Image (cartoon, rainbow, N blue to C red):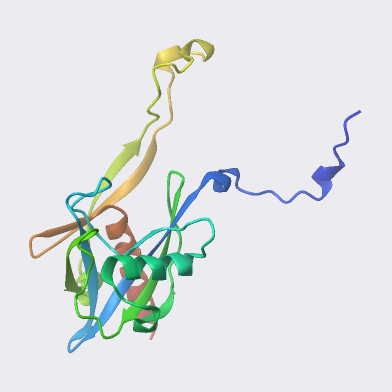
Amino acid sequence: MLNLSFLLEKQPRLLSEADAVHSAVIIPLIEAEDGYEVLFEKRAEDLIWQPGDICFPGGRVENDETTEDALFRELNEEIMVVPKQIKILGKLDIFSLGNNRVHPFVGILEGYRDSFSIDEVAEVFRIPLDYFVETEPDVYDFYWKPDLESDFPFEKIRGGKKYGWRENRQKMYFYEYDGRVIWGMTAKILYYFAAEIRSMNRKE
């Protein structure tokens, strides 16, 4: 008889996390006369992944790194700042898309002079934080469906190629400011950050 006693002490875990890819990004705030401004990057046009998109500084967490380690490394690589120029205010909720986990931070950049690496960044620019607090984004539904390889064994499942795969619906957020379009995960993080700001400031 097989021993199943291990189930008595087993603590369930989310199996998909074993294959998850973690990234760390930051909403970089710069203190201006009229309040905070959010610093954005426009990704270089010759990058393979998301060329020309508007995003926050950040990137993938390597095997031997914490999210904070990865964040500081990416900040140095992308906008050429060092840890002493960054005052971390805190962390936001973790965002999930497929097997990707995005860990957003919020922090203040000090002594920043619009520097960036031309290998990764085409330009940097700023938008007042108040704009995102006061402006609702455009929101659209989009759906994920399985994209199966040609050798997938359809003959082994009921319905074959006509099997009723369940669609995964998510919301896509879009902000537009001064001719620039901010969308995708960057806009989603901004949306929830702005919502938290509104909620907390109503309580004060």
Query: Which image quarter holds the N terminus?
Result: top right
Q: Residue furthest right?
A: 1
Q: Is residue 127 above or below residue 16?
A: below
Residue 159 in sight in this render: no
Position of residue 10 measured from the top left corner of the image (x, y, whole percent)? 77, 48
Position of residue 203 measured from the top left corner of the image (x, y, whole percent)? 39, 82
Query: Which image quarter holds the C terminus?
Result: bottom left
Q: Quadrant of residue 75?
A: bottom left
What number of labels is visible? 0
Q: Quadrant of residue 196?
A: bottom left
Q: Residue furthest bottom?
A: 33
Residue 189 in sight in this render: yes
The front one of 176 and 84 is 84
Q: Residue furthest top?
A: 155
Position of residue 70 measured from the top left corner of the image (x, y, whole percent)? 44, 64
Q: Residue at x 53, y 12 (%)?
A: 156
The front one of 117 and 43 is 117
Position of residue 48 measured from the top left corner of the image (x, y, whole percent)? 26, 45
Q: Is residue 9 above or below residue 69?
A: above
Q: Residue at x 32, y 55 (%)?
A: 185
Left or right: where 171 falls relative to 71? left
Q: Residue at x 18, y 53 (%)?
A: 52
Q: Residue at x 85, y 37 (%)?
A: 4
Left or right: where 37 falls relative to 151? left
